[in-house]
Amino acid sequence: MSEKLKERSEMDSAFMWDLTPMYANDEAWEKAFAASEKTVLSLSEWQGSLKDAASIKEFLDEKTAMEREMNNLFTYASLRNSEDTRNAVGQGMYSRAYGRITSAAAAIAFFEPELLAKEEEELKAIVKDPVLRITGSCWRICWN
């Protein structure tokens, strides 16, 4: 005898994930998603301005914050979509989050080529600058 699959509304909440640590609800996600467009655009404005260790650190700090936010946006949307793949709301959130991540990757694609276009001695000096030395679990640039 086959068992009828339950609708999400019929499921015991003990067997559902809690997405509220990321966003309180879909409206909060929508607000963060809207704000992320400005963040992505601001990161693209760094192109051509990575002149020294201080500017590189500032860019990397903003890039890291953006990546964390993109991760939350995408994870929330992906899980909402996985709740019921028939649901157009979850599908739309997932699609838009994926698109925003793609836009973000394009916006910061200049970083590595711009950095690697610098002369080796300039790169070595930048890496040795104490402004890039961070303690704790944050990112750290190392040069061997």
Image: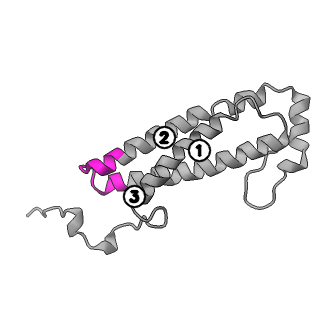
Q: Which three-letter amino acid code belongs to the residue tagged 3?
A: Glu
Q: Earlier in the sequence, mark 1 or mark 2?
A: 1
Q: Which mark is residue 100?
A: 2
Majority secondary structure of the magenta segment? Answer: helix
Q: Residue at x 42, y 64 (%)?
A: 19
**Chain part drawn in magenta:** 80-92
- Look at the image and say whether residue 117 sits in the magenta stretch: no
Q: Which mark is residue 27?
A: 3
Which dot, 3 or 2, sits closer to the camera? 3
Q: Earlier in the sequence, mark 3 or mark 2?
A: 3
Above or below, 42 relative to 114: below
Q: Mark 2 falls on what kind of element?
A: helix
Disc 1: which residue: 39
Q: Residue at x 40, y 51 (%)?
A: 78
Q: Position of residue 125 (x, y in %)?
A: 91, 37
Q: Mark 1 falls on what kind of element?
A: helix
Q: Residues within 10 Å of mark 1 (few under 14, many from 20)?
A: some
Q: Position of residue 116 (x, y in %)?
A: 77, 28
Q: Which three-letter amino acid code belongs to the residue tagged 2?
A: Arg
Above or below, 120 relative to 144: above
Q: Which mark is residue 18?
A: none
Q: State how the image is colored.
A: one colour
In the image, 39: left or right of 127?
A: left
The residues tagged by marks 1 and 2 sit, at their Cα atoms, a distance apart of 11 Å
Above or below, 30 relative to 116: below
The residues tagged by marks 1 and 3 sit, at their Cα atoms, a distance apart of 19 Å
Q: Position of residue 50 (x, y in %)?
A: 78, 34
Nearer the observer, 137 or 34? 34
Q: Residues within 10 Å of mark 2 (few under 14, many from 20)?
A: some
Q: Position of residue 141 (x, y in %)?
A: 79, 45
